[in-house]
Image (spheres, rainbow, N blue to C red):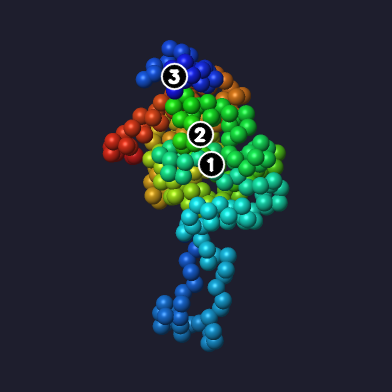
Amino acid sequence: MTDGRRLAYLEALGVDVYVRRGVAPAPATEAELDAPARAARPAGPLPPPVVAAAVPEATLDWEPLRAMVSACTRCPLHATRTQTVFGVGNPHAKWMFIGEAPGADEDRQGEPFVGRAGQLLTSMLKAMGFAREDVYIANVLKCRPPGNRDPKPEEAAQCRGYLERQIELVAPTLIVAVGRIAAQNLLATDTALARLRGKAHALGARGWPLVVTYHPAYLLRSPGEKRKAWQDLLFARQVFARLEAGEQVLP
Ligand code: URA
């Protein structure tokens, strides 16, 4: 990318030009039941397995996972969605950006971050030297909450396995949580975004490295905060470089 184009993206981001460039277990089989358990079980054949739990998303590859998500009825949001919004980008990206939930535009188009806020996220990515295709973009929720309300904890819980599998499949070097809701949800905390910024966090049992930044919808409402978002992205780049160099960045 030319410096001029990057400058234009930085300006869209509101950055002044003097900024330095620089898995559910299968039911036990008869053989697996130990003697006391077998004795406790009523006589007769084993009950049939619960089919829904027989195909945990944690075992799926991309296409079956996508199909499972598009047929999902785990929470009431399935009744009001136009379609699910799975995720987009490079399935082997080193960078993964995770937002909150689809809005009206995303629900219509089936792709995350394509509305006004999405366009600003795209500019933020471009300012970092990325095209959308270079990274992987997903949301905590795969369905739009009506009226763009915040995701309910039970909705996020039902969707969590899908996102965890997406993270496992991408296996990114660094995850960027986009916005307070995504950050708090992913990190299972109610700590304010301001206190989560500027630190490398470990996500989940696998400890995926994660940093946080502001949501572009917030930046559209509060353009004065764009500078801080750019600082977050510069911090993310530093963390990424250290991770790629094999350094220990997590607490
Ligand atoms: N906001 C989000 O968090 N995700 C989207 O996909 C769109 C807007």
User: Counting residues from the N terminus, which is met first, the one under dot 3 or under dot 1?
Assistant: 3
**Is residue 154 something one can see in this rendering?**
no
Name the disc covering residue 132, or none: 2
Disc assigned to residue 2: 3
Amino acid type of the residue that numbered disc 1 sits on in the rendered structure: Val
Quarter of the image where the N terminus is located: top left
From the image, tell me which residue sits under label 1: 88
Residue positioned 47% across, 66% down in the render: 25
Marks 2,1: beta carbons within 8 A: yes
Q: Secondary structure at mark 2?
A: helix
- Ranked by sequence position, the earlier of labels 2 and 3 is 3
Whole-percent x and y of residue 190?
51, 40
Q: Quadrant of residue 3?
A: top left
User: Gap between marks 2 and 1, in whole Å?
Assistant: 8 Å
172 sits to left or right of 82: left
**What is the C-alpha distance between the residues marked 2 and 3?**
17 Å
**Picture residue at 54% right of the left edge, 38% below the top:** 99
